[in-house]
């Protein structure tokens, strides 16, 4: 089994594929002021198995298109939507976030939790803007420095992994120079990382290794995740996900 297939297998039954909580999703959504509107068109890009998609479907009067590159996650989302009685509000779309089929200026809201980094924050903002109506909203969470000074280990790690990492002020500048007006921002809490993402992940380690007969590739995936958890716990004062909510003005 290839490493990508192993990674999908490791994450497929997780409620979330990144730090997040239902409360975070609702908090960000309330900053858009869209919850009282009807007949909305929404895209959730890089949706994974869709924990946040289900929250959006509960909170909004909207047709939601959940977009992901991997059909396994979309199948899981479909199962969850049916179990929640929300299948009529969500349709899934297997597509790259860099090649979307939406009509120009057709969406009221583009949502993306922990996924825009796959194409880079500025590239995502520039490209996705084309699909938003004027006064439509972009809501995206993005790895963010919380301080201008960081310990060497974590700074070097993230500069290798994602050179576009920056402070909130740099992200606001990206939004503003690309025709958006920021309307809200907050930092995900430690509970969103530990309680909702890392602790459930740690509970899967042993069963995952057993399922894959303690193979070298499986052990490598677990070791990588354990190192990520260590880095977060050690350096959580210096970085988190920032949730950015902005309105298209031009």
Image (cartoon, grey):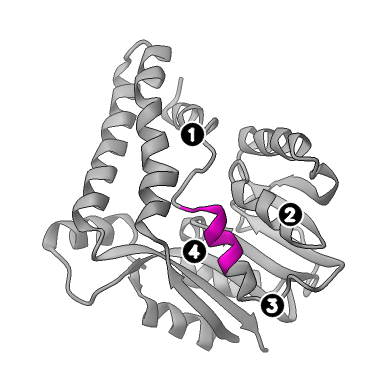
**For mark 1, what is the residue?**
11
**For mark 2, what is the residue?**
58
- Mark nearer the N terminus (1 vs 3): 1
Name the residue located 38 percent from the left edge and 80 percent from the top edge: 170
- Image position, residue 38 (x, y; %): 85, 69
Magenta stretch mostly in which secondary structure?
helix
**Residue 28 picture quarter:** bottom right
- Mark nearer the N terminus (2 vs 3): 3
- Mark nearer the N terminus (2 vs 4): 2
Q: How crowded is mark 1: few (under 14 residues within 10 Å), some or many (20 or more)?
A: some
- Mark nearer the N terminus (1 vs 2): 1
Task: Find out whether residue 196 is within the magenta segment.
Answer: no
Q: In the figure, is residue 4 to the left or right of 145?
A: right
**For mark 4, what is the residue?**
141
* Residue sitting farthest toward the top: 213
**Residue 197 picture quarter:** top left
State how far apart marks 1 and 4 are (Cα): 19 Å
Name the residue located 73 percent from the left edge and 47 percent from the top edge: 93
The residue range painted magenta reads 20-27
Q: Is residue 47 visible?
A: no
Label 3, secondary structure: give it.
loop
Label 2, secondary structure: give it.
helix
State how far apart marks 2 and 4 are (Cα): 20 Å
Name the residue located 69 percent from the left edge and 57 percent from the top edge: 56
Please state which of residues 34 and 141 is positioned toward the viewer in this rendering. 34
Q: Residue 33 has which mark? A: 3
- Mark nearest the camera among 1 and 2 is 2
């Amino acid at each position: 089994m290839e490493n990508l297939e192993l990674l999908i297998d490791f994450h497929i039954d997780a409620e979330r594929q990144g730090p997040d909580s239902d409360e975070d999703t609702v908090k960000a959504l309330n900053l858009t002021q869209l919850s009282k509107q009807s007949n909305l068109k929404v895209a959730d890009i890089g949706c994974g198995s869709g924990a946040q998609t289900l929250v959006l479907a509960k909170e909004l009067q909207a047709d939601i298109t959940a977009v992901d590159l991997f059909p396994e996650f979309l199948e899981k989302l479909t199962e969850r939507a049916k179990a929640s009685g929300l299948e009529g509000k969500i349709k899934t779309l297997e597509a790259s976030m860099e090649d979307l089929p939406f009509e120009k200026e057709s969406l009221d809201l583009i949502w993306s939790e922990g996924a825009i980094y796959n194409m880079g924050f500025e590239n995502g903002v520039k490209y996705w803007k084309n699909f938003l109506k004027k006064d439509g909203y972009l809501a995206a969470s993005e790895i963010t420095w919380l301080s201008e000074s960081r310990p060497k280990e974590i700074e070097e790690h993230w500069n290798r992994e994602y050179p576009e990492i920056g402070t909130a002020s740099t992200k606001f500048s990206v939004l503003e120079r690309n025709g958006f007006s920021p309307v809200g921002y907050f930092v995900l809490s430690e509970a969103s990382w530990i309680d909702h993402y890392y602790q459930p992940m740690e509970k899967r380690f042993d069963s995952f290794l057993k399922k894959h007969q303690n193979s070298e590739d499986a052990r490598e995936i677990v070791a990588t995740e354990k190192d990520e958890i260590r880095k977060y716990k050690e350096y959580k004062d210096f970085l988190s996900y920032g949730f950015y909510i902005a309105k298209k003005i031009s």
